[in-house]
Amino acid sequence: MEFAIASGIGVLVASGVYLLLRARTFDVILGLTLLSYATNLLIFSAGRIVVGKPPVLREGVAATAANYADPLPQALVLTAIVIAFAMTAVVVVVAMRNHADLNSDHVDGHEPSRKAEPPAEGAP
């Protein structure tokens, strides 16, 4: 189980970094999203992966780590999901505005295949 989670985190990080290094805004947004998913999985796996164990104390069950799941990583991941969703929405709105202003989805604002236009006459 730990190998599968570690492999999943590694694939998400590698894909996220690859997409972050691309020159398109949409690819950068997807890369950030994949990195946030990887971070959430990392935090969640830090709290011992157990199946069928409650995160709260129950009467009649010994209060040891073997009988319960750690609730803190679950709460942190839930909060991180909400924050990542809000930040993704903000970045998408900024990217849409950038695309509307510059007519380009390129991170630098201009397509590399386009040549720079000469300045208009009389421009400073």
Image (spheres, rainbow, N blue to C red):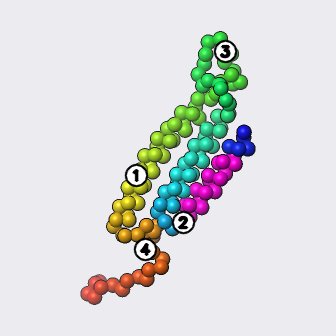
| Tag 4: amino acid | His
Secondary structure under badge 1? helix
| Tag 3: amino acid | Val
Secondary structure under badge 3? loop
| Quarter in which the C terminus is drawn | bottom left
The numbered mark, 3 or 1, whose residue comes first in the sequence reads: 3
**In this picture, residue 80 sits left or right of residue 54:** left
Q: How many marks?
A: 4
| Tag 1: amino acid | Val
Q: Between residues 92 and 62, which one lies in front from this camera angle?
A: 92
Measured as percent of width and height from the top left, residue 33 is found at 52, 51
Magenta stretch: dominant SS? helix
Looking at the image, which residue is at 63% across and 57% down? 14
User: Circle 2 sits on which residue?
Assistant: 22
Measured as percent of width and height from the top left, residue 66 is found at 71, 24
Looking at the image, which residue is at 52% across and 37% down? 78
Measured as percent of width and height from the top left, residue 35 is found at 57, 51
**In this picture, residue 107 sits left or right of residue 74:** left
| Tag 2: amino acid | Arg
Q: Which residues are magenta?
A: 6-21
The numbered mark, 4 or 1, whose residue comes first in the sequence reads: 1
The numbered mark, 2 or 1, whose residue comes first in the sequence reads: 2
User: Circle 1 sits on which residue?
Assistant: 90
User: Circle 4 sits on which residue?
Assistant: 110
Secondary structure under badge 4? loop
CA gap between label 4 and label 3 equals 63 Å
Query: In the image, which disc is placed on residue 61?
Result: 3
